[in-house]
Amino acid sequence: LAAAWRFAERTGRKLVIDWRGSCYLDQPFTNAFPVFFEPVQDIAGVQVICDDRINQHSFPGPFFPAWWNRPAIDCAYRPDEQIFRERDELDQLFQSGQDSDANTVVCDACLMWRCDEEAEREIFRSIKPRSEVQARIDAIFREH
């Protein structure tokens, strides 16, 4: 999330947090972000869409990485090697300091440790767990 936010900030793009299909939920079309975190409209000047509006939103192509330009039926399954290839393509783009000609940049690969610590701190300052999630965190903290 921090790497995607930093890219959106640097390039003047919107950040769409689309965590549908999360392994942490039984509902594949539910965006996991607002289930676990309070809604946000903005992170340090970057407009954020992170609610169920994404279910009605059509993202304009072309897409980066190029694999996402394939017909939707072809995108239903991504083998691990494709995910790793996308991670490397995204890493190169993000580290280059450049933008992409693509209208939509899909960051659907783990880019942990691929952004600066200040970007991570900004994310942690800007997002807050939902009260019921925070209560559970606090309970586990007290218990252990």
Image: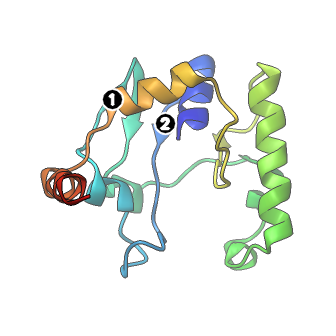
Q: Residue furthest front?
A: 144
Look at mark 2 in the image and give the residue it sits on. Answer: 15
- The quadrant holding residue 135 is bottom left
Give the side of residue 13 with respect to residue 132, left or right.
right
- The quadrant holding residue 104 is top right
Separation of residues labelled 2 and 1 (CA atoms): 13 Å
- The quadrant holding residue 77 is bottom right
**How far across and how far down the image is residue 101, in percent?**
77, 32
Q: Secondary structure at mark 2?
A: strand
Query: Which residue is rendered at x = 35% and y = 69% of the image?
Result: 30
Query: Which residue is rendered at x = 78% and y = 66% of the image?
Result: 70
Give the side of residue 122 with respect to residue 135, left or right.
right
Give whichever of 143, 124 is nearer the camera.
Answer: 143
**How far across and how far down the image is residue 110, in percent?**
65, 52
The answer to whether 61 is drawn above or below residue 100 in the figure is below
Query: Which residue is rendered at x = 75% and y = 73% of the image?
Result: 78
Which residue type carries mark 1? Answer: Ser
Give whichever of 8, 138 is nearer the camera.
Answer: 138
Which residue type carries mark 2? Answer: Leu
**How far across and how far down the image is residue 5, in percent?**
53, 31
- Is the C terminus in the top left, top right, bottom left or bottom right quadrant? bottom left
Disc assigned to residue 126: 1
Give the side of residue 37 with respect to residue 44, left or right.
left
Residue 56 seen from this side: no
**How far across and how far down the image is residue 64, in percent?**
75, 46
Badge 1: residue crowd in 10 Å (few <14, some 14–19, many ≥20): few
Q: Secondary structure at mark 1?
A: helix
Badge 2: residue crowd in 10 Å (few <14, some 14–19, many ≥20): many
Query: Which residue is rendered at x = 38% and y = 42% of the image?
Result: 49
